[in-house]
């Protein structure tokens, strides 16, 4: 049995809450997750719940990073899916290097290299669905934005613009570009 012994604000992100289990830092969650999961000091949790909370922590961080990436510049659903798949492949490669005893450069500052948490295709789809539901991902709106801005900055033929959108995972008809 495990016990939540302390909750503190995140050091780098004040929207996250550090969760201490049995006196030691274990994971962090965003504020909404803490409320939804009803985590409070003194709460006893099982090993299964602890594993679920750790997965929720990783999902929350991944969702937040993806949201920030999408907000930095309008993106298509396809681009977002590819972004998440690249992140997954990079994490798998890093974990493989750690297992072989090779510490990646960005982890050399740490005393011991720690494996990165992996996520699944299901997590990728959940993130994309949530971003779509909240209006952050919309291929039709992205295509309009892309066509308006791309053509204004650098005049291009409609055929070239259509091909660029296809590369971004958006199929459009001839009439849509006019």
Image: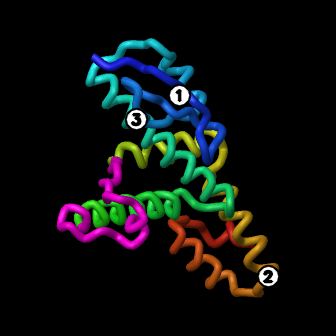
Question: Would you place residue 12 above or below residue 81 in this image?
Answer: above
Whole-number angstrom distance, CA of label 3 to CA of label 1: 15 Å
Residue 7 x/y as whole percent: 54, 26
Q: Earlier in the sequence, mark 3 or mark 1?
A: 3
Which of pointers 3 and 1 indicates the residue nearer the eye? Answer: 3
Question: Would you place residue 153 above or below residue 140 in this image?
Answer: below
Residue 58 x/y as whole percent: 43, 43
Residue 153, labelled with which disc?
2
Towards the viewer: 169 or 110: 110
Quadrant location, the N terminus: top left
Question: Would you place residue 120 above or below residue 139 in this image?
Answer: above
Query: Is most of the magenta stretch helix, strand or loop?
Result: loop
Residue 50 x/y as whole percent: 33, 27
Query: Which residue in the protein does label 1 denote?
Result: 33
Let me know if residue 122 is in the magenta part.
Answer: no
Task: Place residue 3 in its image quadrant.
Answer: top left
Q: Which range of residues does the magenta coloring cover?
A: 97-119
Residue 26, labelled with which disc?
3
């Amino acid at each position: 049995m495990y016990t939540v012994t302390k909750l503190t604000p995140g050091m780098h992100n004040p929207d996250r809450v550090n969760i201490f289990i049995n006196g030691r830092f274990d994971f962090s969650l965003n504020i909404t997750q803490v409320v939804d999961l009803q985590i409070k000091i003194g709460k006893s949790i099982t090993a299964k719940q602890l594993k679920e909370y750790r997965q929720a922590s990783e999902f929350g961080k991944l969702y937040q990073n993806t949201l920030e990436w999408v907000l930095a510049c309008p993106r298509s659903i396809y681009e977002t899916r590819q972004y998440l798949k690249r992140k997954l492949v990079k994490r798998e490669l890093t974990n493989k290097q750690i297992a072989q005893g090779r510490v990646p450069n960005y982890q050399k500052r740490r005393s011991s290299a720690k494996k990165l948490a992996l996520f699944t295709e299901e997590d990728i789809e959940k993130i994309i669905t949530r971003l779509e539901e909240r209006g952050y991902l919309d291929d039709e709106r992205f295509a309009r934005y892309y066509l308006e801005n791309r053509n204004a900055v650098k005049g291009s033929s409609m055929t070239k613009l259509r091909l660029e959108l296809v590369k971004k995972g958006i199929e459009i008809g001839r009439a849509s570009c006019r």
